[in-house]
Image (cartoon, rainbow, N blue to C red):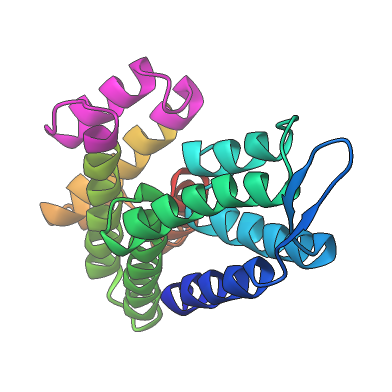
């Protein structure tokens, strides 16, 4: 769907460009239909916000170019189109971490749903193990993104907190969740309850929403 939207907005800029005409005035030069250009900009910013994130260089550069003075709207639009093309190339090449995170979040949500189904079926230990895998995989990806070494869960948790990827309260929560996972993996079923695992799944889901 996102690939299709990039293609649509590429074609829509051609429509904007087709209105190009020379005008004389404060700034002589080529101009395009201002309303069509504004509409295109709004739609592109919405797409870049979704795909790249509002803090990305793509989104910020696109926005900053619009404030450029001493240019016709066509010249400004062409510069913004160059940013749009760069974002499209990075997206199609798989270089945008935000898109990867969206896909990963959907995958993890599916796995957490499996954990819920296991829990509903009475397989409490299996549910805790599946949820724990999601947690550890998330920490691994966060370490890679932060250029931190991938290690055991406790080490990654400490390193990520030290790197300010989350606060000490979250570090303690993850430690508690990891304890449930470890107990489940080693068959120590008396160390946790069904309610503990249910809360574990909910907390991991919340953690994913904050990080991915």
- Left or right of 56? Residue 180 is left
Location of residue 194 with respect to 120 vertically, above or below: above
Residue at (74, 44) in percent of width and height: 72
- Left or right of 15? Residue 51 is left
Estimate the x, y position of residue 21 in percent, counting from the top left. 74, 62
Q: Would residue 69 be seen by someone viewing this image from the given angle? A: yes
Estimate the x, y position of residue 60 in percent, counting from the top left. 59, 37
Q: Would residue 100 be seen by someone viewing this image from the given angle? A: no
Residue 185 found in image quarter: bottom left
Is 148 within the magenta?
A: yes
Q: Residue furthest bottom?
A: 121
Is 123 within the magenta?
A: no
Residue at (64, 37) in percent of width and height: 65
Residue at (54, 76) in percent of width and height: 11
Q: Nearer the viewer, residue 18 or 172?
A: 18
Q: Nearer the viewer, residue 32 or 48?
A: 32
Estimate the x, y position of residue 35 in percent, counting from the top left. 84, 64
Residue at (80, 64) in percent of width and height: 33
Q: Nearer the viewer, residue 3 or 177?
A: 3
Location of residue 166 with respect to 22 vertically, above or below: above
User: What is the magenta range?
Assistant: 143-171
Residue 109 found in image quarter: bottom left
Q: Residue furthest right?
A: 25
Estimate the x, y position of residue 16 in percent, counting from the top left. 68, 69
């Amino acid at each position: 769907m996102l690939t299709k939207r990039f293609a649509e907005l590429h074609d829509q800029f051609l429509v904007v460009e087709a209105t190009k005409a020379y005008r004389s005035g404060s700034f002589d030069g080529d101009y395009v239909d201002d309303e069509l250009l504004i509409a295109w900009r709004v739609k592109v910013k919405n797409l870049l916000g979704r795909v790249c994130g509002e803090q990305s260089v793509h989104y910020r550069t696109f926005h900053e170019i619009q404030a450029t003075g001493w240019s016709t709207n066509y010249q400004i639009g062409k510069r913004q189109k160059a940013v749009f093309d760069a974002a499209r190339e990075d997206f199609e090449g798989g270089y945008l971490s935000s898109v990867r995170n969206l896909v990963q979040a959907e995958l993890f949500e599916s796995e957490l749903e499996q954990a819920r189904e296991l829990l509903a079926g009475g397989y409490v230990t299996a549910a805790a193990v599946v949820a724990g895998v999601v947690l550890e995989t998330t920490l691994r990806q966060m370490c890679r993104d932060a250029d931190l070494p991938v290690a055991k869960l406790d080490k990654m948790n400490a390193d990520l907190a030290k790197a300010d990827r989350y606060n000490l309260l979250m570090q303690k929560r993850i430690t508690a969740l990891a304890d449930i996972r470890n107990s489940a993996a080693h068959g120590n079923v008396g160390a946790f309850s069904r309610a503990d695992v249910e809360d574990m799944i909910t907390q991991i889901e919340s953690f994913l929403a904050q990080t991915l």
